[in-house]
Image (tube, rainbow, N blue to C red):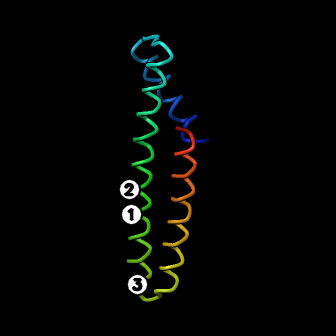
């Protein structure tokens, strides 16, 4: 499920928990905030994964580099995808 869909679902759940019916502009702003938090959280997780790959594969630098590079490629693709949503 794309970030945007997850963010919309989270916003709907928040408004349901608050028993609120926001206008579409407010709902869009909340969805954008949730998307931003998800993107930053993903980037932090990707950095931790790359660090873990380098640490765990310290004996095999080539393997660690390949794993870190693949994580970076996936991260760049996701960020490009998210940027196009705005």
The answer to which quarter of the image holds residue 74 is: bottom right
Compute the Cα span from label 2 to label 3. Answer: 21 Å
The answer to which quarter of the image holds residue 38 is: top left
Image x and y of residue 43, in percent = 42, 55
**Reading the chain from its start, which is encountered first: label 2 or label 3?**
2
Secondary structure under the numbered disc 3 in the rendered image = loop
The image's mark for residue 44 is 2
Secondary structure under the numbered disc 1 in the rendered image = helix
**Reading the chain from its start, which is encountered first: label 3 or label 1?**
1
Q: Are marks 3 and 1 in contact (CB under 8 Å)?
A: no
Q: Is residue 30 left or right of residue 74?
A: left
Q: Are marks 2 and 3 in contact (CB under 8 Å)?
A: no
Image x and y of residue 48, in percent = 38, 63
**Residue at the image position 48 percent from the left and 25 percent from the top:** 28
Vertical position of residue 39 compared to residue 65: above or below: above
Assess disc 1: are there few (<14), some (14-19) or many (≥20) residues with their C-alpha within 10 Å of its C-alpha: few
Image x and y of residue 17, in percent = 42, 18
The image's mark for residue 48 is 1
Image quadrant holding the N terminus, namely top right
Q: Are marks 2 and 1 in contact (CB under 8 Å)?
A: yes
**Residue at the image position 44 percent from the left and 52 percent from the top:** 42
Assess disc 3: are there few (<14), some (14-19) or many (≥20) residues with their C-alpha within 10 Å of its C-alpha: few
The image's mark for residue 58 is 3
Compute the Cα span from label 2 to label 1. Answer: 6 Å
Image x and y of residue 4, in percent = 55, 36
**Residue at the image position 41 percent from the left and 57 percent from the top:** 45
Residue in the foreground of this view, choosing between 2 and 13: 2
Compute the Cα span from label 3 to label 1. Answer: 15 Å
**Mark 2 vs mark 3: in front:** 2
Assess disc 2: are there few (<14), some (14-19) or many (≥20) residues with their C-alpha within 10 Å of its C-alpha: few
């Amino acid at each position: 499920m794309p970030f945007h869909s997850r963010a919309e679902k989270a916003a709907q759940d928040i408004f349901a928990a608050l028993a609120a019916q926001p206008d579409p502009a407010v709902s869009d702003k909340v969805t954008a905030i949730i998307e931003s938090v998800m993107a930053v959280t993903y980037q932090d997780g990707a950095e931790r994964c790359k660090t873990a790959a380098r640490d765990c594969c310290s004996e095999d630098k080539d393997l660690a580099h390949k794993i870190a590079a693949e994580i970076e490629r996936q991260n760049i693709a996701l960020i490009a995808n998210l940027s196009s949503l705005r």
